[in-house]
Image: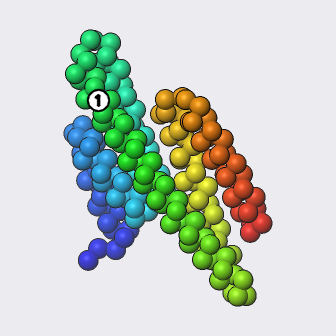
């Protein structure tokens, strides 16, 4: 069996091949698997954002050309990827916050867990920043979006303050 690092490399290689072949759905699924194994993998994050942008561009181009069927198809892919990414990041955030809570409880027993808390808090902040980016860049811009971005900003500040206590 391959180590998690080896799996990440394998998935990235496969995903990049799909990306080059413009088989974005297949590549996207593999990039998500990478994030499942290595939540802070910047290459997978970058490619996912590129895929979202590509679907949006294809949608806009089809719309301008009057091909409403293609525009709708690309719009559905665009929204599916965004929803899926939001769900994945939300689940990662929940798991990471739970791990953080467990470390805080461990710390209360007198065990020094500062070395473990710092990367966990950094990961929470990164996930929140990714969620904020998605809401700002790829949303419909309604009042619910504004409120969500505001809540995320407050939460980021809270965790940044907590992180500063451990550094």
Q: Above or below — where is 111 with respect to 86?
A: below
Q: Please indicate, yes or no, whether residue 64 appears anywhere in the rendered image.
A: yes
Residue farthest to the right, as pictured: 165
Q: Position of residue 83 (x, y in %)?
A: 40, 44
The residue tagged 1 is: 74
Q: Give the residue at x 22% y 21%.
A: 69
Query: Left or right: 113 with respect to 54?
Result: right
Task: Tell which of 104 and 28 is nearer to you.
Answer: 104
Q: Above or below — where is 46 with respect to 164?
A: above
Q: Position of residue 126 (x, y in %)?
A: 57, 53
User: Badge 1: few (under 14), some or many (20 or more) residues near its Cα, within 10 Å?
Assistant: many
Quadrant assignment, res 22: top left
Regarding mark 1 in the picture, which secondary structure is present there?
helix
Q: Please indicate, yes or no, whether residue 113 appears anywhere in the rendered image.
A: no
Q: Position of residue 49 (x, y in %)?
A: 43, 40
Q: Give the residue at x 36% y 25%.
A: 57
Q: Above or below — where is 125 with respect to 167?
A: above
Quadrant assignment, res 115: bottom right
Q: Where is residue 54 in the image (x, y as percent from the top left)?
A: 35, 31
Q: Above or below — where is 75 with respect to 151?
A: above
Query: Left or right: 158 with respect to 75?
Result: right
Residue farthest to the front, as pictured: 144
Query: Left or right: 33 with respect to 133?
Result: left
């Amino acid at each position: 069996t391959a180590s998690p690092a080896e799996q990440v490399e394998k998935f990235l290689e496969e995903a990049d091949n799909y990306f080059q072949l413009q088989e974005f759905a297949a590549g996207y699924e593999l990039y998500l698997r990478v994030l499942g194994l290595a939540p802070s993998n910047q290459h997978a994050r970058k490619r996912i954002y590129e895929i979202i942008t590509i679907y949006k561009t294809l949608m806009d181009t089809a719309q301008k050309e009057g091909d409403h069927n293609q525009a709708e198809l690309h719009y559905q892919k665009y929204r599916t990827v965004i929803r899926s990414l939001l769900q994945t990041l939300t689940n990662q955030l929940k798991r990471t916050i739970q791990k953080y809570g467990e470390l805080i409880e461990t710390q209360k027993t007198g065990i020094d867990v500062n070395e473990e808390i710092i990367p966990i808090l950094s990961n929470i902040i990164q996930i929140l920043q990714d969620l904020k980016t998605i809401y700002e860049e790829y949303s419909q811009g309604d009042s619910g979006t504004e409120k969500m971005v505001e809540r995320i900003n407050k939460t980021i500040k809270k965790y940044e303050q907590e992180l500063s206590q451990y550094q």
